[in-house]
Image (cartoon, rainbow, N blue to C red):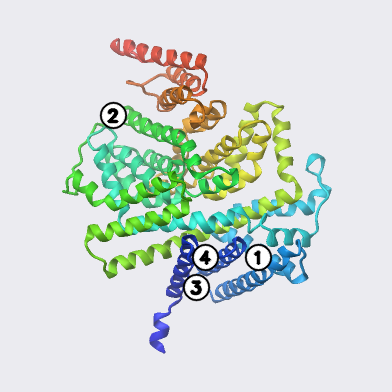
């Protein structure tokens, strides 16, 4: 009996529950288990809340507190009981046209309270407060002035709508978490456990070795590769920054500069196809387009984002006079051998992309990609041993644990979306943006950018996008911006909010690793990402930047976009081939803005300014002057 107690420790029991959670969803995605959408969403949230309350303490420093553990147990039991009740009642409610009984209301009230607490524990007080403001709106609307006023609803009506309908907590966001996101978090965990991180780092290092700013450029490559599947910019920094930041500081970058570069690169991983973090899956569902269309649309802006990062780190090295170094690799294998040994990972990504392009759903494609990776590992290592099985089991467990916090954010976003739909607040916010802009699309875009950054501060990418997609994007659509473009606009600013002070989470994590002032790291990251603040505006006016124009327009967008972000990077760092004075930086910034906005006249003017700046810089340099 004593041996059994020692074996079934709380941590091991939670690991078993997490593995069962992950395996359960893999079986659903594979088609082995068949169930209705509502049943899947109910059980998903029930298990996610159970794991979250068991793992996340009520407050820091209370991990071992007996009272806190008792409270956790009460919350877990309440969540299971309420979820099982709603699971038994969803069919009668659906078949009766929405008729509910008193017990449905009480069960729903429990679920809503648990979602608030899960959002607070898992993501932070910011998301819980934002959700609370929207939840209280239907009760306060009769007393609000002007367009915000409304008829109001009672508590029972709001609660039952949010918990017994697929437009509330159990709506699209939690559905995406239960299919797309959990599959890809397991995929990402499997990549990590099988050694993909070491492979990606070695390839990035070899590709940039001998270049000026080699360590910073390898950091950009490495972080983009890992960031695609991590789902969190701050989490990506925590994983990759411990490797890349020390390399950059040794090469000659100041700690806050290394932190800023790492934060920018990790943020960019969230917008890089094919995976684009987790929010892109939700975008495909919300907008109603295929995921391959999302990938195609996001490709050029993502390449321009990373192109900017490469230009910034190169120019920073030029300005700081950091010479090219050829640090020898500690890995003695040839590059061909490294690629050969990493073939299981290459094959997995090829399978993922190929299957999605063939029309497979992203979660089915990722399931097959995992199979390809495991099979490739067995073939390449010529063994199927306990160590490999342990890694696979650990990946399923880790992936399930990683989706728990995202699921809490999705459930909170479901409350916001449900309230917007029930009360009509969504259309009112769109009208407010329209009124505040005076009908000017540019002013509307600026207002949307500010709201997106403010609402996205302190939130993971997925949570930020979920809120912005329901609250802000409809306002742009109402003003004539195509739906997909509007959603990409808010998606980008939701991502960029992680490197925008005063709540720049990714930059703060990087600053901590670098031992730099976190606020200085945050402002440095925001400056390095300056071209990215203009890109969303540019693709609202030029569909070529989203590859939605004709061939000529798309090609022109590639050229002018690359020149534009490079010119803005030159303005930010203050160096072309040689340092620039303030007027020279202003000219570079103006050239970049003109090039980004997709118009023939502005492109010609921008190109002319850039050529003139380069010519004058070289002429002045011969005379020992700066421009």
Which corner quadrant holds the C terminus? top left
Q: Which mark is residue 385?
A: none
- Of callouts 2 and 3, the N-terminal one: 3
* Residue linked to disc 3: 64
* Residue linked to disc 4: 56
* Residue linked to disc 2: 321
Tell me the element at label 4: loop
Residue 500 in view, yes or no: no
* Residue linked to disc 1: 111
Is 298 placed above or below 103 here? above
Tell me the element at label 3: loop
CB atoms at circles 4 and 2 under 8 Å apart? no
CB atoms at circles 4 and 3 under 8 Å apart? no
Q: Residue at x 46, y 26 (%)?
A: 554
| Between 249 and 2, the one nearer to me in the picture | 2
> Marks 2 and 3, how far apart in space?
52 Å
> Marks 2 and 1, how far apart in space?
58 Å
In the picture provided, is 353 more to the left or to the right than 470? left
């Amino acid at each position: 009996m004593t041996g059994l107690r020692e074996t079934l420790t709380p941590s091991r029991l939670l690991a078993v529950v997490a593995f069962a959670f992950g395996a359960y969803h893999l079986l659903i995605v594979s088609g082995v288990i068949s169930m209705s959408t509502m049943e899947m969403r109910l059980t998903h949230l029930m298990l996610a809340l159970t794991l979250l309350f068991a793992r996340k303490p009520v407050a820091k420093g209370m991990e071992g507190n007996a009272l806190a553990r008792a409270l956790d147990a009460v919350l877990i039991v309440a969540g299971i009981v309420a979820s099982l009740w709603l699971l038994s009642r969803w069919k009668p409610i659906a078949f009766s046209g929405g008729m509910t009984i008193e017990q449905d209301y009480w069960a729903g009230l429990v679920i809503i309270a648990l979602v608030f607490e899960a959002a607070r524990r898992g993501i932070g007080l910011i998301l819980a407060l934002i959700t609370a403001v929207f939840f209280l709106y239907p009760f306060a609307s009769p007393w609000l002035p002007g367009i915000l006023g409304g008829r109001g609803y009672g508590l029972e009506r709001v609660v039952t709508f949010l918990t017994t309908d697929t437009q509330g907590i159990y709506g699209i966001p939690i559905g995406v978490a239960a299919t797309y996101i959990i599959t890809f978090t397991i995929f990402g965990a499997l990549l990590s456990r099988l050694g993909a991180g070491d492979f990606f780092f070695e390839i990035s290092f070899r590709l940039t070795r001998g270049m000026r700013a080699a360590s910073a450029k390898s950091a950009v490559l490495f972080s983009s590769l890992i960031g695609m599947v991590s789902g969190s910019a701050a989490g990506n920094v925590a994983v990759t920054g411990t490797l890349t930041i020390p390399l950059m500081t040794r090469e000659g970058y100041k700690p806050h500069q290394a932190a800023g570069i790492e934060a920018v690169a990790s943020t960019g991983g969230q917008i890089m196809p094919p995976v684009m973090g987790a929010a892109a899956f939700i975008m495909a569902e919300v907008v109603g387009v295929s995921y391959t269309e999302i990938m195609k649309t996001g490709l050029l802006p993502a390449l321009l984002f990373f192109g900017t990062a490469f230009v910034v780190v190169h120019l920073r090295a030029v300005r700081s006079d950091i010479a090219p170094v050829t640090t020898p690799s500690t890995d003695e294998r040839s590059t061909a051998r490294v690629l050969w040994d990493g073939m299981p990972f290459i094959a997995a990504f090829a399978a993922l992309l190929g299957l999605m392009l063939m029309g497979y759903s992203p979660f089915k494609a990722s399931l097959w990609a995992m199979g390809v990776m495991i099979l490739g590992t067995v073939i390449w290592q010529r063994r199927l041993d306990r160590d490999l099985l342990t890694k696979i089991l650990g990946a399923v467990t880790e992936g399930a644990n990683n989706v728990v916090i995202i699921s809490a954010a999705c459930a909170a976003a479901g409350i916001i979306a449900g309230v917007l739909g029930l009360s009509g607040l969504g259309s009112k916010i769109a009208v407010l943006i329209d009124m505040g802009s005076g009908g000017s699309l540019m002013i509307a875009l600026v207002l949307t950018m500010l709201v997106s950054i403010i609402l996205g501060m302190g939130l993971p990418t997925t949570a930020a996008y979920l809120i912005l997609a329901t609250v802000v994007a409809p306002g742009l659509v109402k003003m004539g911006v195509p739906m997909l473009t509007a959603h990409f606009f808010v998606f980008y600013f939701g991502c960029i909010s992680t490197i925008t002070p005063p709540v720049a989470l990714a930059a703060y994590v990087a600053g901590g690793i670098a031992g730099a002032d976190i606020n200085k790291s945050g402002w440095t990251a925001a400056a390095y990402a300056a071209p990215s603040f203009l890109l969303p505006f540019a693709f609202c006016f030029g569909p070529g930047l989203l590859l939605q124009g004709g061939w000529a327009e798309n090609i022109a967008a590639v050229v002018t976009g690359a020149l534009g972000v490079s010119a803005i990077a030159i303005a930010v760092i203050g160096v072309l081939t040689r340092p620039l004075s303030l007027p020279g930086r202003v000219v570079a910034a103006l050239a970049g803005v003109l090039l980004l906005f997709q118009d023939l006249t502005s492109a010609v003017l921008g190109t002319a300014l850039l050529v003139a700046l380069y010519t004058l810089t070289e002429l002045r340099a011969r005379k020992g002057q700066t421009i």
